[in-house]
Amino acid sequence: MGKPKGTVLKQKIWGELMGSVKDLAVKKPASEKEMGLGVFHFTDDYSVFDYGKMPDIIPHKGEALCRMAAYNFERLGKNGINSHFRKLVSGNEMEVNLARVLYPQRGELKPGMGNYLIPLEVIYRNSLPEGSSVFKRLQSGQTTMGQLGLKRMPKPGEMLDAPIMDVSTKLEETDRYLAWKEAAAISCLSGNETEKLKKTALKVNDFLNKRAKKIGLEHADGKVEFALDPKRRLVLVDVCGTLDEDRFLLHDFHISKQVLRDYYKTTPWYAVIEKEKADGKGKGNYTVPPKLPPKLLELVSNMYKSVTEAWIGKKIWGAPKILEVAEEYKRALERGFK
């Protein structure tokens, strides 16, 4: 099935909401008093380090993300968590309700409004990997253990006694971490609404932890996004619990988009784009990234397919088991993916 008819938006009106791996066909625009209607089309594109669309496509990645996200929305709905998900249209398309995108920094968002994307990303963390931004922010004094709800300094990689949450901006040029008081203020949320948002994010995290454990994975961290409907009821939006939004581990081995980040960190391209960013040249768009080695591309495609099939409990492609993909990846890594 091709892309749905309608006005297809790619990083335009919906800006950061779409990213570079999903298209949105707007069937009916959202208004102040009524949610809109749209169809997400998940592509096989990928992005790392805020670069935008990378030079390869990962076969079946879009369908894997779509099916995994749809499964999560359906299960979360049965657990009392409302979302904008309506139905799975095809393997890589889902129909969703749409909220307005209003920018606080432009003065578009006012107290008492309804039907808008909450301009925040809520990040839950069940463990902190080596090099985590949390350690850096603690060391620099940008945050404290008390603010994060930590009773002691955790070791890299260890599971936390209880998940911690961060919150960052969503619709600014560069995302920045916020204190919850500021997050509520720029989002025009009351104290009760902010607490409900936090509790709902933790419920999503708990569901993902249990589902991951059932298929032999550890759920390290991830993010969720929300909107308020016309009656200011909380609605889970975008997608959650996929290999692009969240990080999963198998015996300390990454089973997520992190494997792509890890590969590109070994290339000269990564050092160049980091320097470009430091020099104020934007997000590294001045240097073209190299293509992935064919073997790595094959393995990453199998990773997305194998996790999706295990997660939803349904064979779609007849992919290898997750453990088989992980073991083959380790062997290929030792050979330099040759």
Image (spheres, grey):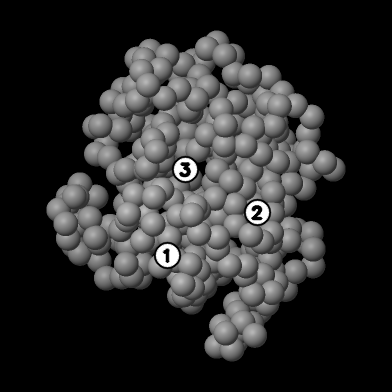
Q: Tell me the distance, in whole angstroms, between the alpha carbons under discs 2 and 1.
A: 22 Å
Residue 101 image point, x, y percent: 50, 25
Q: Amino acid at mark 3?
A: Val
Q: Note whether 271 is above or below 112 in the view shown.
A: below
Outermost residue, top direction?
33
Q: Quadrant of the N terminus?
A: top right
Answer with mark 2 or mark 1, whichever residue precedes in sequence: 2
- Residue 62's x, y, as percent? 69, 52
Q: CA distance from mark 3 to mark 1?
A: 31 Å
201 or 210, nearer to the observer: 201
Q: Which residue is mark 2?
A: 45
Instruction: Say if 105 sits above or below 15 in the image.
Output: above
Q: Which residue is mark 3?
A: 224
Q: Tell me the residue that label 1 is attached to.
A: 272
Left or right: residue 296 versus residue 217 is: right
| Amino acid type at mark 2 | Asp
